[in-house]
Image (cartoon, rainbow, N blue to C red):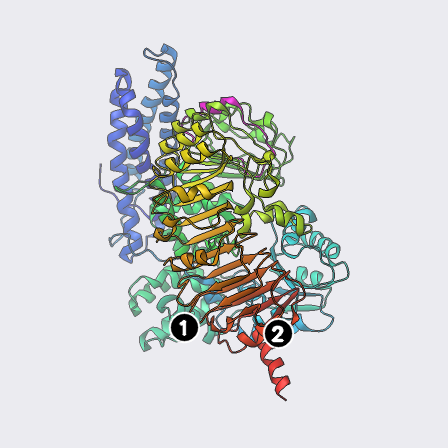
Amino acid sequence: MEALLVTPAASLANWVLQTLVCWGVTAAADKVALVQVVRNDVKSIEDELPMMHALLWASSTAYTSGGGYSNRGGDRLQTAWVKQLRDLAFDIEDGLLEFMLLKGPWPWADADLSRVAKQIADLRVRVEALHERNTRYHACLRPDQHGDDDSEPALLDDWRHEAIIGREGNKKALAKLVRRDGATVVAVWGMAGVGKSSLARMLYDDSDLITCFDRRAWVTVPHALDGAQEFGRLLQEQIGEDGEQRCLVVVDDVSSHEEWEHVSRCLAANQAGGRVVVLVTTQEEDVARLCSGDGDVYELKPLPHKEAQKVLCQKVYKDAKYKLPNDMVKQAKFILERCRGIPLAIAAIGGLLANRPKVSSEWTTLQEHIRPELESAALDVKRIISLTYDGLPYNVKFFFLYMSIFPKNHEIRRTRLLRRWMAEVYIEKPHGMTLEQVAKSHYNKLINRRMIETSNKVGNSMTSEYCRVHDQILQIILPKSVEDIQLFIMDKHYNEAPQSNVRHLVLARQKRNEEKLTRIKLTCLRSLTVFGECPVSLVTRELRLLRVLDLEDTVGLTNEDLKDIGQLPHLRYLGLRGTDISELPSCLQNLRFLETLDVKDTKVTHLPAGIVYLENLSYLRVGVNFATEKMGEEKNVSKRKLLGTLADFVCGCHGSNNSESGCSSQFSVRAPEKIQKLSKLQVLGVVHIARSQEAKKLRKLTNLRKLGVHLDAVDKTRREFCSSLSSLVQLEQLEVHCESLEFLKGMTEPPSRRLVSLRLCGHLGNLPRWMSRLTNLSKIKLLRTGLKQEDIEVIGSLPNVILLGLWKESFGEECLSFGKGKFRMLKLLEIEGLKKVKTICIENDALPVLEKLRVRKCLELYNSGQGLFSVKSLKNLNELELTNCGDKLELEMQLRRQIIGFSNRPVLITRKYVVTWTEMMLNSFYRLI
């Protein structure tokens, strides 16, 4: 094939073809070879696709690293050629998948054989015809320079950090409005990308403002917002229903009058006599005035030149104060004038320059290339950011575009995203790496480049387990996703059918009985995702090529809707988390390619026996984890919120009726009878192990990395479980629930030296001797273990523990002490529900890097400095909480005195009050005078 080169627009199709060669053709080649009539055609396709791959790969590297920019004169020809190439790639995949669905031993039926032979022959003809057209019309143009793809520009490398440069004055002005007596709604408006949300976040996290309010809540408006119910749920999770409190609520991204009507009704219903100040962000001035009632409206304007240059320098040189060389000042001025002070545009331009030679000629080249966009009357931010997208490595583009499946402002769980990526089979697996490792690498690359941003929603690991796509970026990638990965989003406002085949379908806010789905050709779908209500009879045989079925948190899903799930033979990901299903159909066993089955937080109490035939199953999440104590003691807190707290693990003791363990049999999920057949399982939990034979079979699951079990109180079962643990050498996370955990002390060796997370629920008395050998352990969470001070010393000697949760009855003595030189890496310490503890002592040089100390529901603590003392040694502390511990006014005063000199100004949370460092300093000064 002629060695032609194309622009980066072809790189995604290139990557699809490469993965088809690596997966589809290889998987089917041996079977097809048995059929002489199609052998030559398949071989021809197999030879042709790598050549097409090499052609397109060379084209993508030419743009991204060579520093040259494509000749735009051939854009139309290139676009048409790439579209044909992409469609052909998908159709080849369809043909190979259809071939793999042929059932029965040799010989096949003549009709099936003829159909497959004709389909493969047609594909071969199309491949040859595409090459001929490409040569004839010269659709592929040759750039001037070449290179590798190791230095692609970042899209939005920490753009939120850059967006706050030069905004201190705006922050002070806005804070004045929020603090003003009588203020109820303050609205901030400005054009897209100007930094409204970043400014609101600066204010929301400001320690001086926090002291003015008892509680805070940040709610990003879901789009489209159909009513107050969804917004109300999000608000309720953060502030509860205590009407006597003063509360600051940030409502981010209100886009219309109708949305504000829903939001305002919900806010009015939640005030109940308390004072609520609302800070709204919006792009529309009329919406801002409606929200504020023509009161406090603040327009956020673009940055002046001096501050804009700081943003550019921060982006390119990682130093906002960098002084540009004289020969580059002119180029910088031209670029910044055309960016018109919009931080998002400046960050995007900087992303193009950050990894390229920092010389005047390079900046001049950029000016010439994007001069039409920069000189237009209305700045085309989308075009500027699109240029940085074009420079991405081709094998990452698919995963980035895949993010557009999720709605605007949606919090995407990291594990959900990674498992979906893996199920799409478009991940190339380098030698020595697993698919999950490659998926994590792509995820981290997107995070590091700030193309996706970590969410403010933080999980138990002290790191964000959720991410989201900036709304401006989402607007850019949506049309690209429609074109390049054939995504189609059908919501209640969309009445047109797609113009071409659909590979990824999203149903958003549909009514359960709507007929719109009949307009879609389902036979080509690779993924189907539902947000909102689930359509009736969604699962049909037409979805036979489907790989991903994600119904997480859908409304109205019934057992009947899943009765035909077995007719989706290529399904690899089945997400049912958070739905109302109570039973899985027996035909589930037909899903031989299934890798992920997530039925966590459902009503499912048992798994079909045939699940053990799913030989590729690697991720099995079952059961319902919830904190019984919090359900009983905190009013109006939804179960979904409880799932996100540190106490998730504490009462997931499924399958027991023992009231002492706080467990309920209605949430138990029995382990499958022949669970040992699921040899590829990497994640399993939480399952109920009732018999010794079930415990014994776990030892066959040697690939397990995460295991959660609830054990019945039978000695033989416990012994077999311990024996099985010794075989699970790859185990990284272990969660064990049992009325008594003392059997663990009978083990002579640790369950696995790789353990990084350990969760124990049940009486233990003393830690097992092997505990001191878990040198990789970083997270420990305990409930009802009844430990002693000597056990705390053992935990404190472990070198890598960053998180420790001591929950109800996990410690059984009156004095809890953290000794000198202990807990060298601990950053988060949670102490809750320790009924006997009267004194918490922190010795000098203990907990040297602790950032958060939370003490809750310890009613017996002394109401004096002896209750919690030597906090003054915790110089890295940024949050100290003492709540629900009874009337402890003297202790609270002592804590203020202990941390008043801290340079990092920690926040003190006591009862309903949040006290900042500044307030503590003022109070101290007043006492002196």
**In magenta segment, residue 585:** yes
Res 807 seen here: yes
Residue 4, position in %: x, y?
25, 43
Residue matched to label 1: 320
Crowd band around label 1 with a 10 angstrom C-alpha radius: few (<14), some (14–19), many (20+): some
**Residue where numbered disc 2 is placed:** 893
Q: Quadrant of the C terminus?
A: bottom right
Query: In the image as oriented, which residue stretches furthest toward the bottom?
Result: 929
- Point out the stretch of residues depicted in magenta: 576-594
Q: Residue at x 55, y 26 (%)?
A: 562
137 and 415: which one is in front?
415
Q: Is residue 897 left or right of residue 735?
A: right
Instruction: Name the amino acid, label 2.
Output: Met
| Vertical relation: 435 (above or below) 248 | above
Q: Amino acid at mark 1?
A: Ala
Q: Position of residue 595 (x, y in %)?
A: 42, 33
